[in-house]
C-alpha cells in the first residue's frame, strides 16, 4: 500500500512526515516526500495533513 506524492506540488516542508504513524514518509534528495510502500498502512492521515494537497490515494 502506498500514497502518491505529486512532486510538482510538494514543497518538502515535511508536515506529512510528522503525522505518519508508521514512519513511511521521508524526503528524497530533491526535497520531495516519498512513501515507502512496504511500510504504509493506508491510514491516509498524510493526505489531510498536506497543506498543498500534494498527496493522493494510491491505486
Ligand atoms: S506535507 Fe505535502 S508539501 Fe509538505 S512534504 Fe508532505 S507532501 Fe510535500
Ligand atoms: S497513508 Fe498513513 S501510513 Fe501511509 S504514508 Fe500516509 S500517513 Fe503514513
Image: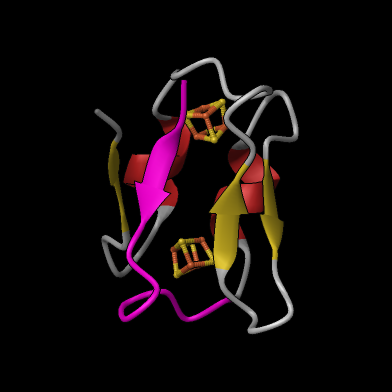
Q: Position of residue 4 (x, y in %)?
A: 37, 47
Q: Is residue 37 above or below residue 25?
A: above
Nearer the observer, 11 or 51: 11
State the scheme by which the image is colored. secondary structure
Q: Position of residue 5 (x, y in %)?
A: 39, 57
Q: Is residue 22 left or right of residue 42?
A: right
Q: In the rendered view of the protein, which quadrant contains the C terminus?
A: top left
Q: Is residue 22 above or below residue 48?
A: above
Q: Residue, x 40% and y 73% (percent of image)?
A: 7
Range of the magenta residues? 1-12
Nearer the observer, 50 or 10: 10
Q: Residue, x 35% and y 65% (percent of image)?
A: 51
Q: Is residue 38 above or below residue 55?
A: above
Q: Main secondary structure of the magenta part?
A: loop
Q: Is residue 10 left or right of residue 33?
A: left
* Numbered circles on residues, count: 0
* Residue 52 drawn in magenta: no
Q: Residue, x 32% and y 81% (percent of image)?
A: 8
Amino acid at each position: 500500500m502506498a500514497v502518491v506524492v505529486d512532486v510538482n506540488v510538494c514543497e518538502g516542508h515535511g508536515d506529512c512526515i510528522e503525522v505518519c504513524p508508521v514512519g513511511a514518509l521521508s524526503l528524497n534528495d530533491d526535497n520531495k516526500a516519498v512513501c515507502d510502500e512496504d511500510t504504509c498502512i493506508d491510514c491516509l492521515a498524510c493526505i489531510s495533513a498536506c497543506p498543498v494537497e500534494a498527496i493522493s490515494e494510491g491505486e
